[in-house]
Image: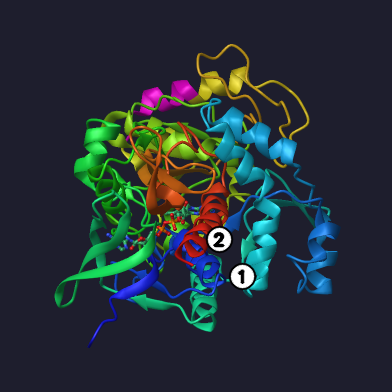
Amino acid sequence: MTVQTDWDVVVVGAGNAAMCAALSAAEQGVKVLVLEKATKEDRGGNSTFTAGGFRFCHDGVEDLRGDILDDMTPGEYDSIGNLPAFSEEQFMDTLMRITEHQCDPDLAQILVSKSRETMRWMRTHKIRFIPMFGRQSFKIDGKHHFYGGVNIEAVGGGWGLVDMLMNAAERMGITVLYETGLRELIQDEKGAVTGVRAFGPDGYVNFSAKSVVLACGGFESNPEMRVRYLGQGWELCRVRGTQHNTGDGINAALKIGARPHGGWSSCHAVQWDISAPPYGDRVVLDNFQKHSYPIGIVVNLDGKRFIDEGADYRNHTYAKYGKEVMKQPQRTAIQIFDEKTHGMVRDEYRIREVTKASGETIAELAKALDINVDGLEATVREFNAACQPGEYNPSILDGVCTKGLEVPKSNWALPIDQGPFHGYVVTCGITFTFGGLKINTDAQVLDLTDRPIPGLYAAGELVGGIFFQNYPGGTGLLNGSVFGKLAGANAGQAAK
Ligand SMILES: Cc1cc2nc3c(=O)[nH]c(=O)nc-3n(C[C@H](O)[C@H](O)[C@H](O)COP(=O)(O)OP(=O)(O)OC[C@H]3O[C@@H](n4cnc5c(N)ncnc54)[C@H](O)[C@@H]3O)c2cc1C
C-alpha cells in the first residue's frame, strides 16, 4: 500500500483527545492524518475502556434537555428526581481542592469555562449522551437522584464514544492509519516541528506536516517509566486500560527539548479486582473496578482499616485510593459489606469475573478470605462501637461518621453487623499518569525556556499540570475533548 506522506496536520493517537483534535483541525479545511500505534480492533486507547462519563458545567436537567440530551426519551426524563446544576464555580473549586491547588490555573480556567461549549460542539459531530442512570444516581422513591458532578455519559460508554468519534472523522474526510506508531519528531534547522517519524507494518515512514498534535496518552503502560517516576513497586500494579500508552509522545517531545510539567510522581489509580489481567480487558472493561467502598469498610490482609472510606463522594476519592492499596502487604485489600448495604453495591460487583468470599460471621468471612481472623474481628468490633447515630443517606455527604478511631469514616458509617458478610479482594489498578508536557493556553508545547515549539501541540493524558495526587471523576475525557478541540483548531489554523 502506498502511504501518502505529506499532510497539513498529523495527529498522534486515536483516543478521545486525538479524535477531537483531528475533527477540530479538519473543520479548518486542512488535510488531517491520524496515526495510531494499535490495530484497528484495539483502537481508541483508554477512551474505549471508560464508562464515557463527562464532568462539565450545566444548569440542570432542563438546561441539558435543550441540547446535550436533546434525544432523551420522555420515560428517561420522568425517571429523574434530581439532576443538580454544576456551576463553573463548583467545578473550579472541586478541581482545585482535589488537586491540592496544584492544577495550573490558566489550564484549569480553560477546562472549566470551555467545558459546556465543548460538549455542545461534540454533539454537533453527532456524539450522543445520556444521564448516567446506572452509576451516578441512587434511587429514592423510585426516582433517580444524581450526585457528585459526573452525571452524563456517552451512549454506549467508551466503546460508543470512540465509534461515534470515528464515524465523525470519516464524515470529515480524516485519514486514520493503524499499526503506525510515532517514534520521533522531525524538526527543521530553526527547531520547528515539520513532521514525525513513525514505525508501521512496512518499517519506518517519515510523515511531513505543517503542525503535529501529540495526543498519544501517558506512560501508565510502561513499567520502566512507572518505577522511574512513581516509585518502587509500581511495576507490579495492574493497568486498567490500553497497553499502548507507553509514554512515546512524552519521550519524543522531551528529546527535542520540551518542558516536563505537573505531577510526575503521582497518578490515577483505583481499587481493582485482584484477578484482573495485567492490562485492560476489552470485554469486561472498567467492571474490574470496585467503587462501592464508601458504603462498606476496606481492610488489609491483617484485617486493619487504612483509608477513610467515607472521606468524600466516591468521585473525589476513588482515584487516590489505588495508591493506598499499593502500600499494603502484598498490594492487597478487601472491601467488606454486610447485608444492610450489600444490595446497594454497583453493577461491577455482580460480574462473573469477581474475586469474593462470604461468611455468616466475621470470623467465617476472614477464614474464607484467608486473612487474619482476630485482626478483622477486632477491627469490625471497634468500628461498630465507634459508629455514631444519624440519618443515613448515600446520595449526600450525610455526616454519619465514626468517633475516636485512628482511621475515621467520615460519612455513611453504618455498623457492619448483619450477616451474611461479603468480602471483595482488590489490588491497585493504574488508570493514567499525571506528569507530562507543558502547554500554553493555545495548547502549544513549550520548550525548556517556556517558549512554544513551533508546529507542536498537545492534548489529553500526556499534558502535565492539570491533575496532581488526585482527580475528580469524569474529567479525563473532558480534558481530552477541551484541549483536543483547542489544539486541533490552532494546529489547523497554523497549517493554513
Ligand atoms: C478503565 C477506565 C475507565 C475510565 N473511565 C473514565 C470515565 O468514565 N470518564 C473520564 O473522564 N475518564 C475516564 N477514564 C480516564 C480516560 O480514559 C482518560 O483520561 C482519557 O481517555 C485519555 O484520553 P487520551 O485521548 O488522552 O488517551 P487515550 O484514549 O489513551 O488515547 C491514546 C492513544 O494513543 C495511542 N498511542 C500510544 N502511543 C502511540 C504512538 N507512539 N503512536 C501513535 N499512537 C500511539 C494509543 O494506542 C491510544 O489509542 C478511564 C480510564 C480507564 C482506563
Secondary structure under tag 2 reads loop
- Single out the residue that lies furthest toward the bottom: 1
Residue pictured at 43% horizontal, 63% vertical: 15
Between residue 231 and residue 382, name the one nearer to us.
231
Q: Is residue 436 left or right of residue 398?
A: left
Between residue 359 and residue 21, name the one nearer to us.
21
Dominant SS type (magenta):
helix
Crowd tier of the residue under label 2, counting other residues whose Cα lies within 10 Å: few below 14, some 14–19, many 20 or above: many
Residue pictured at 77% horizontal, 71% vertical: 72
Residue 471 is situated, as x and y percent measured from the top left of the image, at 52, 38
Measure the C-alpha gap from mark 2 to mark 1. 8 Å
Residue 119: in sight, yes or no? yes
Amino acid type at circle 2 is: Gly
C-beta proximity under 8 Å, tags 2 and 1: yes
**Ligand 1 quarter of the rendering:** bottom left
Amino acid type at circle 1 is: Val
Q: Which residue is mark 2?
A: 52
Residue pictured at 66% horizontal, 51% vertical: 115
Q: Is the residue at mark 2 in contact range of ligand 1, meaning its CB lies under 8 Å from it? A: yes
Whether residue 374 appears in magenta in the rendering, the answer is yes
- Single out the residue that lies furthest toward the front: 190
Residue pictured at 53% horizontal, 25% vertical: 100
Task: Give the residues drawn in magenta, as a range.
Answer: 371-379
Q: Which residue is mark 1?
A: 155
Residue 192 is situated, as x and y percent measured from the top left of the image, at 32, 52
* 174, above or below 329, in the image: below
